[in-house]
Amino acid sequence: MSKTEWKQVETLTTILLPFKLVSVKLQKTSRPRIDHVFWSYESLFNNIDDLQTMLARPRYRNNAWTKTLAVAVEQMRLKLSKYYQKTEHPFVYSDAVILEPSGKLLLFEQDSFEPHFKSKYSYDCRERYIDNYESTLQVPRLETTLKRKRAIDEDSEDNDDDYYRALAKAEKQRGIQNEYDFYIAGPTAPKKRDPLG
């Protein structure tokens, strides 16, 4: 192959590899979590932004084949956007990300999100919690749960109560009664935890 053809292959690999990696990552788990979907979309959209920036550079811009690739990359963005917006309940993605204890609002603090999205997504999630769950659930006070957990884990060598103690301390300091506010105000989990747990 010619140097130009090798450059084309290199560019095509740069374009397609991130999509392959995301596909493999989501397919290799038997039950991919919904919060992973939002992070995957975020990484793919960021990748498309980087590609469009790269193809606009003088080194690439003047090649005829680059113009064709630029059109293809824009079509990739449109296709990804189509599927991104296709869900009937789009809030499922943002809520799943927020309710993942080691991430919470971290995704929405990335540069690719406008500053207002963090508060908007958090506010909307909080409202859904209040409207759909808070009034119907009798959630035990965390302090009671903590006493029970401490009694169970008292002799455990790998006692990871520190996270729960920090949450209890945060609740006392803020006087927070709403479970969503309490969850958001507390520290993120030091390691991945099961959101359902």
Image (spheres, rainbow, N blue to C red):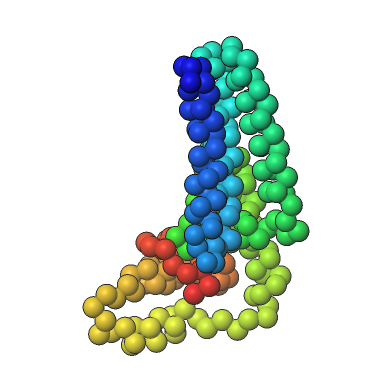
**Any part of residue 108 in sight:** no
130 or 18, which lies in front?
Answer: 18
Q: In this view, does 192 lie above or below 139?
A: above
Direction from residue 45 to residue 167 in the image, left or right: left
Q: Is residue 89 above or below residue 82?
A: below
Direction from residue 153 to residue 145 in the image, left or right: right
5 or 69, which lies in front?
Answer: 5
Residue drawn at x 53%, y 45% is 20
Q: Specify the farthest residue to the front.
A: 1
18 or 107, which lies in front?
Answer: 18
**Any part of residue 81 in sight:** yes
Q: Percent x, y for residue 91?
A: 68, 58
> How many discs appear?
0
Res 95 quadrant in image: bottom right
Q: Percent x, y for residue 160?
A: 32, 72
Q: Percent x, y for residue 79?
A: 70, 41
Residue drawn at x 66%, y 30% is 72
Q: In this view, does 57 lie above or below 128?
A: above
Residue drawn at x 56%, y 81% is 139
Q: Percent x, y for residue 18?
A: 51, 41
Direction from residue 61 to residue 28 in the image, left or right: left
